[in-house]
Amino acid sequence: HDHDDEEEHHEGDGHNHAVDPHVWLDPVYAKQMVETISATIQSVDSENKMAYQENTAAYVEQLEALDAEFQAAFQAADNRVFVVQHAAFGYLARRYDLTEVSISALTSNQEVSPAKLAEIGNFIKENDVEVIYYQDSGNNDLATTLAKETDTELGVLSAVEGITKSDQEAGIDYLTIMHNNLEALKQTIN
């Protein structure tokens, strides 16, 4: 295991011990991914190169606008901490100078110890945390328990992992979900 890589992925986060794979939740990295994928497709299907380039340029513009919205929303925020059940938003947090505090480790399916719950409960009270976020595609038992114990609201953040065919048909896509995440985070980051 590459320890330098682990430190890179968890800078400023003392609650996680696994590498965060959710690079696409950072709009700037998402843009780079789109451009890389597009370049590869163009090399395979050169006949349609212009169409790919046009579509890529249009989508990159939307991703740049999304990045600008996140920057504008959080630029002057005093409270920059958000609490999540599972750490999936480390890349997004680092991009916008936020701090993600997670209830359990990224890849852990084990129950969190009472001591850990008490530790995070104290953190929530001491830092006046008003919202605990859980992932829409995951179990929210821990977040629910902690919210009850600390009289805190529950919020939803999406890691864009559970988009169904019916979601797509309804027009729900990466940009929709990331805008929803932005609005959800505004409850805490202000």
Image: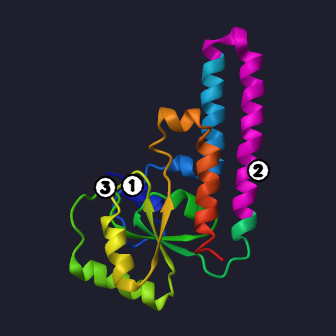
Q: Is residue 64 above or below residue 33?
A: below
> Rounded to the nearest whole Å, what is the CA distance between mark 2 and mark 3?
32 Å
Tell me which segment is drawn in magenta. 43-71
Residue 106 screen position, x and y as percent = 35, 58
**Point 45% across, 57% down: residue:** 88
Circle 2 crowding by C-alpha within 10 Å: few under 14, some 14–19, many from 20: few
Mark 3, residue position: 107
Q: Which mark is residue 43?
A: none
Mark 2, residue position: 65
Q: Is residue 189 above or below residue 139?
A: below
Looking at the image, tell me whether mark 3 or mark 1 is earlier in sequence order. Answer: 1
Circle 3 crowding by C-alpha within 10 Å: few under 14, some 14–19, many from 20: few
> Rounded to the nearest whole Å, what is the CA distance between mark 2 and mark 1?
28 Å
Is the magenta region chiefly helix, strand or loop? helix
Q: Nearer the viewer, residue 18 or 133?
A: 133
Quadrant for residue 123, please give it. bottom left
Q: Which mark is residue 19?
A: 1
Helix, strand or loop at disc 3?
Answer: loop
